[in-house]
Image: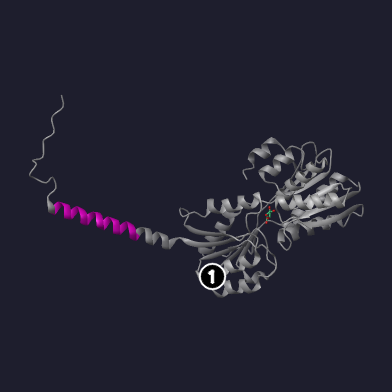
Amino acid sequence: MGKALAKVPADKNFWEEKDMKKILALVLALVMVSCLFVTAHADELLKIGYVQVGHESDWRMANTQNYYDVFTKEAGFELELIDCDNDHARQLQEVRNFITKDFDYIVIDPIQEAGWDDVLKEIQDAGIPCIIADRAVAASSDLYTTAVGTNMTAEGETAGLWLEEYLAGKAAKILVIEGSTGSSAAIGRAEGFNKVAANHPEWEILASQDGDFTQNGGQAVMEDFIKRFPEFDVVVCHNDNEAYGAMDAMDAAGIKYGVDGKIIISFDATNEGLTRTLAGKILCNVECNPIQAVIVMNVIKALQAGETVEKFTLVPDEGFCAPGIESAIVTTMTDEVLAARKY
Ligand code: AHR
């Protein structure tokens, strides 16, 4: 049998009053020290303001999530990410709010390529380093600290070169569903594709229309195209979501696409986009990598360390085509490629 515990006499407090006071003082001191520690730690966090384009596509959602995953408190950052809902005026205003709130770094993913000079000067005058991410601005690079992004013109050119290889001299009637008008992503992809198309008098671009990088936009433009152009061979969609919308419109109209139908070319190469490429529905899908936050973070760390950084850091990307197509331009899709695609 265990030993019985000694009882505390009922008339005696277990803790003497003076002991209690000491303990309370100690607890209070500990609370104050931990408060001081938290405040000091919060002060050390770098305040990053990111004006995000919006939430128009799967690519965009993956990019937003990537920023939240990378710019954590544990990594030393306090991130404020604003979804500007594809509204250029709002994006300018949100940048001005960041300036007023004296953020340590401002990261801009520009909805529009043009119209940035004034606000970039304001950031510079406030002495805040500014990073242009993903898309580009049509402004002097003296007005911002550095830029990180993919080469959208090269993406368009890859799509054009793949089509050149695939058609091998055959004539083609082409429809283009563009990304948001005025965005460097749409401008660059059109420029790159048109550069190759200019070498092909046998290619006819029937129409090129804004689908706003959304599935609904892609569907609406394709429905319109189907009414206006009974004959076409190729649909170039400036992102995966537009391609899904175009497919919905073609499905509804009973139009076949894929290896034995109309040729669909897309951009982004998200997991869903590559699933449809592996299934032979999208014949060529040119990647645009949304996983850019760690590169932006490394640039910030280098700047914090007083190092000089390059004016532009390229986010590399590659193209993919459907199984059964051999290509010297892009990689033929496999299950392994798809399994590795996390976004
Ligand atoms: O700026 C990147 C582009 O914008 C992506 O292609 C598209 O999906 C996004 O909305």
Q: Start and end of the magenta stretch?
A: 18-36
Residue 293 within the segment the image draws in magenta: no
Residue at 72% of width from left, 40% of height from top? 276
Q: In the rendered view of the protein, which quadrant contains the N terminus?
A: top left
**What sort of colour scheme is used for the picture?**
one colour
The secondary structure that most of the magenta stretch takes on is helix
Q: Which quadrant holds residue 18?
A: bottom left
As displayed, is residue 296 above or below residue 167? below
Asked if residue 26 lies left or right of residue 166, the reply is left
Asked if residue 25 lies left or right of residue 116, the reply is left
| Residue 329 visible in the shown view | no
Query: Is the residue marked by circle 1 packed among few (<14), some (14-19), or many (20+) residues within 10 Å?
Result: many
User: In front here: 227 or 57?
Assistant: 227
Which image quarter has ligand 1?
A: bottom right
Q: In the rendered view of the protein, which quadrant contains the C terminus?
A: top right
Q: Which quadrant holds residue 3?
A: top left
Asked if residue 8 lies left or right of residue 198, the reply is left
Would you name the residue on which mark 1 appears? Answer: 99
| Residue 137 visible in the shown view | yes
As displayed, is residue 259 above or below residue 65? above
Asked if residue 171 lies left or right of residue 145, the reply is right
